[in-house]
Image (spheres, rainbow, N blue to C red):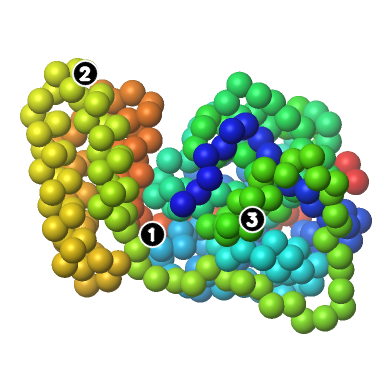
C-alpha cells in the first residue's frame, strides 16, 4: 500500500554524481526518443526500463519490465536504480523543451494506484518549476524527489534550456517508505562502482483490485451519486461490489479471470456517468476503469538531431 503524502513534495536524503549522470545521458542523444504518450507538445522520453525491454509506453500490467538497449549504455544509471533497493517498474528519461510545459493533471489510473514516482533532475535550470497541489518547487540537478502524483501537478519550463529528469516508477518498499519521512537527514551520494550491478525489477503477474480496495473506491463514487440523488447508479455500484467480491473469491489474481473482471468494469463504465462526478469520485472511477489497460499510447519515434538542443549543465 502506498503511503499517504503529508506534503506535496518529499526530497529524499540522497543525491547523485551529477557530472557522471549528465555525461551518460548526453551520450544517448544519438538515439531515437519517443514523443510523450499523451501528445504533450515539447515533451519526449527515452525508455530505460519497459515492458519486454522494448521502446514503448506500456503499463507494467502488460508484461515483464526489462532493461531497454539504452540502459545498457548507462552503468551509473543502473547503479542508481540498484541503490534505491526497490522493485523498479517502468522508468524513463523525460525531456521538456524550452518554454514547454506539462499541463495540469493528476495520475489516477490503476498503474498509479500501485506505484509512485521518483524524480532525479539531470539537466535543469532554476526557471523550471514543478507544481503540486498548491505548492511549487524547483528540483535541483542531482537531487532525488517524490511528490503526491495523485494530486494535481504540472511543470513549466520557463527557461531557454531543455530539461531532462530521470523518472523511476516503483511499488516501493517499507524501507523506502520510511525514508520519505526522513526529510531532514543529510543526503548521501549514490556512488559509482565499476562492477556489474543487479537491478531489482518489478516481477510481472496479473493483478486486480482486491475486494476491500474495490469497496473503498466504490464508496467514494457512491457518496457522490447519492448526493446527486442518482439512486439507480448507486444501486448498480452496490451490486458491482458484491459481484466483484464473488469473482475475486473464484479467480483471485489469476489471468483466467480477466474476461469476467473486464465485463464487470465495462458494465460500470456504461452504467455510471463519469462526467457528473466530482474530482475525487472521478479519480476513484478512473482507477477502476483503467485496471486492465495495457497500452498508454503507441510509440512515435523522434530524432533529436532534428531538434535544437540546449542544456544548462
Classify residue 204 by image quadrant. bottom left
Of the residues under marks 3 and 2, which one precedes in the sequence? 3
Disc nearer the start of the sequence (2/1): 2
Closer to us: mark 3 or mark 2?
3
Compared with 214, 295 (above or below) is: below
Q: Is residue 133 above or below residue 44?
A: above
- Distance in Å between CA atoms under marks 2 and 1: 34 Å
Residue at mark 2? 227
Q: Nearer the viewer, residue 130 or 254?
A: 254
Residue 224 in view here: yes
Q: Secondary structure at mark 1?
A: loop
Pointer 2 local density, CA inside 10 Å: few below 14, some 14–19, many at least 20: few
The residue that appears at 39% across and 71% down in the rendered structure is: 205
Residue 183 place in picture, x, y as percent: 74, 41
Residue 176: image tag: 3
Front: mark 2 or 1: 2
Residue 253 picture quarter: bottom left
Q: Judge the density around disc 1: few (<14), some (14-19), many (≥20) Cα neighbours within 10 Å.
A: some
**Crowd rating for badge 3 (residues with CA inside 10 Å; few <14, some 14–19, many 20+):** some
Q: Which residue is mark 1?
A: 294
Sequence-wise first label, 1 or 3:
3
* Whole-percent x, y for residue 263 in the image: 16, 55
- Seen in the picture, residue 196 relative to 68 is either above or below; the reply is below
Residue in the picture at 55% in, 49% down: 116
Amino acid at each position: 500500500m502506498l503511503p499517504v503524502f503529508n506534503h506535496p513534495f518529499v526530497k529524499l536524503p540522497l543525491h547523485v554524481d551529477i557530472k557522471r549522470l549528465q555525461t551518460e545521458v548526453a551520450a544517448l542523444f544519438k538515439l531515437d526518443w519517443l514523443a510523450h504518450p499523451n501528445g504533450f507538445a515539447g515533451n519526449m522520453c527515452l525508455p530505460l526500463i519497459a515492458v519486454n525491454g522494448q521502446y514503448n509506453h506500456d503499463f507494467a500490467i502488460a508484461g515483464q519490465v526489462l532493461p531497454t538497449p539504452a540502459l545498457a549504455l548507462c552503468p551509473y544509471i543502473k547503479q542508481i536504480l540498484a541503490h534505491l533497493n526497490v522493485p523498479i517498474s517502468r522508468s524513463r528519461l523525460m525531456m521538456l523543451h524550452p518554454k514547454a510545459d506539462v499541463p495540469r493533471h493528476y495520475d489516477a489510473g490503476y498503474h498509479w494506484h500501485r506505484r509512485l514516482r521518483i524524480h532525479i533532475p539531470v539537466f535543469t535550470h532554476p526557471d523550471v518549476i514543478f507544481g503540486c497541489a498548491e505548492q511549487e518547487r524547483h528540483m535541483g540537478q542531482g537531487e532525488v524527489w517524490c511528490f503526491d502524483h495523485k494530486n494535481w501537478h504540472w511543470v513549466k519550463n520557463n527557461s531557454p534550456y531543455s530539461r531532462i529528469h530521470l523518472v523511476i516508477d516503483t511499488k516501493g518498499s517499507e524501507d523506502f517508505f520510511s525514508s520519505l519521512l526522513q526529510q531532514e537527514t543529510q543526503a548521501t551520494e549514490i556512488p559509482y562502482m565499476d562492477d556489474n550491478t543487479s537491478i531489482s525489477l518489478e516481477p510481472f503477474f496479473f493483478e486486480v483490485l482486491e475486494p476491500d480496495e474495490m469497496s473503498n473506491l466504490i464508496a467514494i463514487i457512491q457518496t457522490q451519486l447519492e448526493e446527486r440523488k442518482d439512486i439507480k447508479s448507486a444501486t448498480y455500484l452496490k451490486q458491482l461490489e458484491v459481484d466483484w467480491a464473488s469473482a475475486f473469491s473464484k479467480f483471485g489474481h489469476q489471468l483466467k479471470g480477466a474476461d469476467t473482471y473486464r465485463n464487470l468494469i465495462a458494465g460500470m463504465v456504461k452504467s455510471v456517468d463519469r462526467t457528473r462526478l466530482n474530482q475525487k469520485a472521478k479519480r476513484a472511477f478512473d482507477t477502476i476503469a483503467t485496471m486492465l489497460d495495457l497500452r498508454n499510447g503507441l510509440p512515435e519515434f523522434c530524432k533529436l538531431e532534428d531538434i535544437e538542443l540546449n542544456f544548462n549543465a
